[in-house]
Amino acid sequence: MPEPHSNGLTRRQVLGIGGAFGLLTTTGLATAATLARRPATTGGQLRSTAQLPPPYQVPLPLPAVLKPVSTDGAADRYEIVQRETTAEILPGLRTPLWTYGGSFPGPTIEARRGRPVTVTHHNELPVPTAVHLHGGRTPAESDGYPTDLVLPAGWPQAPHTMPGMAGTDGHGGGMGAMTDPRAVTTRLKRDYTFPNDQRPTLLWYHDHRMDFTAPAIWRGLAGLYIVRDDAEDALGLPAGPREIPLMIADRAFTADGALTYPSLDPTLRERPGVTEPYVAGVLGDVILVNGAPWPVHETDAARHRLRLLNASNARHYELEARTEDGRRLDLVRIGADQGLLAAPVTHQSLPMAPAERHDLVVDFASAPVGSLVRIVNRLGSGRTRDVMAFRIARPATDDSRIPPALTTDLPDWHREDAVRTRDFAFRAGRMNGGHGWLIGGRPFDPARPDVTVPLGDTEIWRLIADVHHPVHLHLVGFRILTRGGKPPLPHDAGLKDTVSLRPGESAEIITRFDGYRGRYLFHCHNAEHEDMGMMANLEVV
């Protein structure tokens, strides 16, 4: 992994994909171009054989809010059992799932800023797990590092040895067994402590086991986590039943209702990776929202706050809200991955990469009572163009508002504050004769130090991609400075923890590495890319 250099690449070479850095990516661009199916996607789409319901028939479920098992006035403690279950996702069929607490999505945790939460996770699944609070400002020992595993009963594997990346026959990374001497494993259960010393926002928790993140999330290991504070509560935004969390995820189903996924080892015990057509990412042909296919939600003709998460493995969306007469309703974006914007930004459509969140206000007052407002995906085709709908059931009074100024606590980082600049190429590559996904030309190795940052330093990172790569940093939020050498796009506003790089695109981000010392990660959040090597270590010292 390249360390900072003062006499390295020029701005034109990095941001224009020219010169030496451009040459570095040429092979990756050529290789990855053969993997991308169409410009709007990176990945291969599975086809369901189950009978699928028509859109807008299944009611939208709302994830249950988890109650603490104890509280001492200063902190809350929760318990979650990771277990197998079945649920009716497609009408009339039962789908086996791996779950947090027996539901998909898992239960929502509601936290207050500055009030610590400890979650005890009990692993009753047949494989090890690791829980990551995505977007959390979390001490390293609770960040869910991919080798810090919770082992199930009877698991025979030595705690510090991992099976490694998938085989050497062109279907996976082919890295062989790997050893991580710093791995901290526990058996049956583990406490994860989240100080919640961060801006109010929508986070999510998901499995982060090394090499098997993608199929574990696909099977159901994902849930929402919301941080709130008094200042946000006082803004007068839509609240109560008019604040709706929406976890969007695509899946595919067999004829009997089971999830289908192209794992090389369906037990997820030994051999990671997916079959050849899906090494660029796995796409489903059924769009689920809060675990329901193309659902409908009956509601008032009033403003609503929609808390959106793209929990898909690899699918990108571009969302619009359309009335039955074809009008597009404004999507008023009030928050990004890491909390409120300084001021609202109005959009007609919004792109959304895996792991990104949007905090939106949509006003349904102009939609006739009895009509539908459809949320559609402009990047989809056929059934994947539909997402969900709102049925406007009744007129309503509305005392909510969207203040012209939302917050003043955004970090004020400037380019001249950066003490160093680093360059990273995210591209396809070859590993031991198989396909892989690399950062800086190297696949992930938990025992290798990649980037070391002194606590408190501000840095600029320059990122470049061959195909779609949503790049996620653990521990810190960042601001997007440029895209392709130009100012950031309107949807880049605010504090982010995931930046969506489009094919051939570059971006500059700025962040301050504060909070905690320890070993963290940065990686592509296309979950298949992540499992096949596109992850690196970040050590804060």
Image: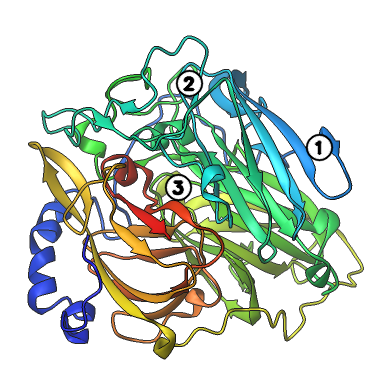
What distance separates the C-alpha of mark 1 from that of mark 2?
A: 32 Å
Q: Which residue is mark 2?
A: 258
Return the mark for residue 319: none
The span from disc 3 to disc 1 (Cα, nearest Å) is 37 Å
Residue with the mark numbered 1: 68
Q: Which image quarter is the N terminus in?
A: bottom left
**Label 1 packing within 10 angstroms: few (<14), some (14-19), many (20+):** some
Question: Residue, x 37% and y 22% (percent of image)?
Answer: 268
Amino acid of disc 2: Ala
Relative to 171, say whether 427 is above or below.
below
| Tags 2 and 3 touching, CB below 8 Å | no
> Is the C-beta separation of discs 1 and 2 under 8 Å?
no
Residue at 17% x, 32% y is: 171
Q: Amino acid at mark 3?
A: Thr
Q: Amino acid at mark 1?
A: Pro
Residue 364 in view in this figure: yes
